[in-house]
Amino acid sequence: MRLTIAAALFALSGHGAMAACTGQNLFDTMPAERAAAIEAASRDVPFRQGLLYQAVRDDQRITLVGTYHFGDARHQPMIERVRPLIDQAHALYVEAAPAEEARLTKALTEDPTLMVDPDGPTLPERLSPDEWDALSQAMLDRGTPGVITARMRPWYVALMLGVSPCMVRTMAEQGGESGGLDHLLVAEAQDAGTPVRSLEPWDTIFGLFEGLTPEQELDMIRASLPAASYADDYAVTLTDAYFDGDVWKIWEFGRFDAYANSGLSRKEVDRQMDLAQTRLMDDRNRAWIAPLLEGAAKAGDEGIVAAFGALHLPGEAGVLSLLQDEGFTITRLDG
C-alpha cells in the first residue's frame, strides 16, 4: 500500500527512478499461512492478473497497459509489445501528460505550502516522542533532515515513507530523469507523433487527501512507519509481483503486512485500506471512464492506448470492470 501511494505522487510530479534497489522478496520468507491468506483474498477479484488488455465495443478499441511508475530494465519487453500499437493509435492516454506534469512541478516550485505547513503545529508536537524519533530517522534515511520534516504536511510524509531509501538516492543521482513505464511509453508516443492526453488534471494529488481529520492524517504516518525500516525489501517484493503480472496480490500484500507489522488493529488497517482504495483508485477509475469513452469514440478504427498504474486495472471498481459495464468485451493480451 505505501509504495503504491508514494508512486502516485512521483508519477504525477514527473519523477521516476531506475529501480536499482536490492533486497529480499518477502513472499519467500513470510509464514505459509499469511501467503495462503493473501492468495485467498486475491482469488475472486476480477481481472486480478495481467498487465496488458484490450477492450472492444463495436468499432471502438482501447488497449490498456498496467504500468509501474519506477524504472526497471524489465520494462523493455512491454515497450516492444506496445510500441506498434502506440504508433497506430489515435492517442495515448496517461494519468498525467507532460503538460500536466509541468504545471504540477511549477506549482510545487512556486508554492511550497502545498507540501509544507508554515503555521500549524509541527509533527514533533503532534506525535509522541517515540513516533517522532522513528519518523525523523526514517526521513533522514530518505535525505530529509528532521528540521524540514517537522513542517511537512502529513500526507506528503506518508508518501515519502513509502519510497525506499535506495529509490530516493537513485532519483537524486539521476536528477529526476524518468524511467517509469508511463514515461517510457510517453516517449514512444512523442517519437511516433501520437498525441499524449491526460486522464486527470495536474492538481489531482492535492484533492486525494482533502477532508481528512488531523488524527486521520497522523494515522497515515503511523501506518507507514513500521514498513519504512524494510522499504527496500518491500519495494523488491512488490516490483517482483508486478512483473509476474500478479497485480491484486500487490494490494493484499500491503494489507496483510500491515496486519502483522503496523501495530494497528485489523479493523483500523481495513479502514485505512478502504480509504486509500476509494480515494487513490476507485474514485479516479470512475473519473477516467468518460475521457476513455470519448477518446475511443473519436478514434474509430485507430483505437487508443491507455497506460496507468497497474492497480487501476483489477477489481469490481477497476477500469476493466467499469469498461465491461459499458458494454466492452475485455481480452487479456499477455496471458
Image (cartoon, rainbow, N blue to C red):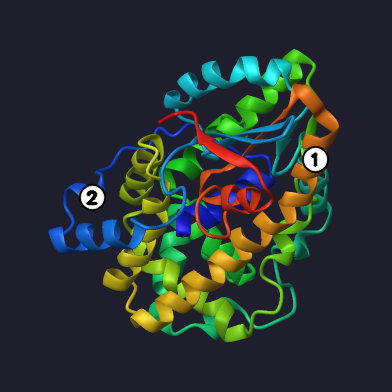
Name the residue located 76 percent from the left edge and 59 percent from the top edge: 112
Position of residue 191 measured from the top left corner of the image (x, y, whole percent): 73, 14
Looking at the rendering, which quadrant does residue 243 occupy? top left
Count neighbours of disc 1 (C-alpha within 10 A) and say few if under 14, some if 14 to 19, many if 20 or more.
some
How far apart are labels 2 and 1 at the CA level? 38 Å
288 over 216 or under it: above or below: above
**Mark with earlier residue (2, 1):** 2
* Residue 147 visible in rendering: no
Q: What element does badge 2 sit on?
A: helix
Looking at the rendering, which quadrant does residue 241 occupy? top left
Q: Would you name the residue on which mark 1 appears?
A: 102
Amino acid type at mark 2: Phe
Position of residue 228 measured from the top left corner of the image (x, y, whole percent): 39, 60
| Residue depth check, mark 2 versus mark 1: number of the one nearer the observer | 2
User: Which is nearer the eye, 206 or 285?
Assistant: 285
User: Which is nearer the eye, 149 or 6?
Assistant: 6
Q: Quadrant of the C terminus?
A: top left
274 over 107 or under it: above or below: below
Q: Are marks 2 and 1 in contact (CB under 8 Å)?
A: no
* Residue 157 visible in rendering: yes
Q: What element does badge 1 sit on?
A: helix
Count neighbours of disc 2 (C-alpha within 10 A) and say few if under 14, some if 14 to 19, many if 20 or more.
some
139 over 196 or under it: above or below: below
Q: Would you name the residue on which mark 2 appears?
A: 27
User: Which is nearer the eye, 39 or 276?
Assistant: 39
